[in-house]
């Protein structure tokens, strides 16, 4: 759907509050009526946008790691993926702004609260091969760590100085692999 495709660019330029329905529909070449025939509110639209993006990450990482069995290769690919994704600040800032508004307006729901849990779990499960000796694996926790390092607000404001997202993800996964990976 063209509205979903155009919205991230509008949000990146205008911010959540500034990304009006008018601006989104104009960028997509649709009318406001078309918007409201598919979505009840701007918040509902952005939740749908975030849900789709979260699902795409899992699919993308699954393809990226398909057939890869060496932990070092998994770590390299994930570190590079994280660096690439963190270059677009939209996906780090949009959830923060959306959730802040929902809490302020008292419209925060279970849908908001659980939005990323399935994504975290999916990503974590894909990364578990680097830690086969982890006795009580927690894929949701592992996925949350990697994705928060990738999309976290701090990465959105990076000036190129200090640790890069690639380095943070690599260190985290290296340490996990050293602690719970196969012995040499």
Image (cartoon, grey):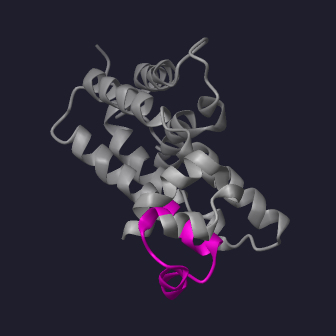
Is residue 44 visible from the viewing direction of this image? Answer: yes
Please tell me which residue is depicted at 61% across the width and 52% down the height of the picture: 94
Q: How many marks?
A: 0
- In this view, the residue farthest toward the left is 67
How far across and how far down the image is residue 177, in percent? 40, 24
Front in this rendered view, residue 159 or 63? 159
Please tell me which residue is depicted at 64% across the width and 29% down the height of the picture: 157
Q: Quadrant of residue 126?
A: top left
Q: Quadrant of residue 101?
A: bottom right
The question of residue 43 being in magenta is answered with yes
Left or right, residue 176 beside residue 81: right
How far across and how far down the image is residue 131, in percent? 38, 32
Front in this rendered view, residue 160 or 116? 160
Up-down relation of residue 162 to residue 128 (above or below): above
Quadrant containing the C terminus is top left
Quadrant containing the N terminus is bottom left
Up-down relation of residue 124 to residue 70 (above or below): below
Up-down relation of residue 151 to residue 120 (above or below): above
How far across and how far down the image is residue 133, in percent? 38, 32
The question of residue 166 being in magenta is answered with no
How far across and how far down the image is residue 128, in percent? 37, 40
**Dominant secondary structure, magenta:** helix
Is residue 47 visible from the viewing direction of this image? Answer: no
Left or right, residue 27 beside residue 101: left
Q: Which residues are magenta?
A: 27-50
Please tell me which residue is depicted at 50% across the width and 59% down the height of the picture: 7
């Amino acid at each position: 759907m063209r509205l979903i495709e155009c919205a991230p660019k509008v949000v990146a330029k205008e911010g959540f509050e500034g990304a009006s329905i008018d601006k989104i529909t104009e960028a997509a070449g649709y009318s406001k009526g078309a918007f409201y025939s598919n979505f009840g509110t701007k918040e509902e639209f952005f939740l749908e946008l975030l849900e789709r993006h979260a699902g795409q990450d899992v699919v993308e990482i699954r393809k990226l790691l398909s057939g890869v069995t060496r932990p070092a290769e998994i770590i390299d690919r994930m570190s590079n993926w994280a660096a690439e994704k963190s270059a677009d600040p939209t996906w780090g800032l949009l959830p923060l702004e959306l959730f802040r508004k929902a809490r302020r307006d008292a419209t925060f729901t279970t849908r908001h609260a659980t939005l990323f849990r399935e994504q975290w779990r999916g990503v974590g499960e894909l990364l578990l091969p680097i830690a086969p000796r982890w006795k009580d694996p927690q894929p949701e926790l592992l996925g949350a760590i990697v994705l928060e390092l990738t999309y976290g607000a701090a990465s959105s404001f990076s000036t190129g100085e200090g640790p890069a997202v690639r380095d943070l993800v690599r260190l985290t996964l290296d340490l996990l692999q050293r602690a719970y990976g196969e012995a040499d």
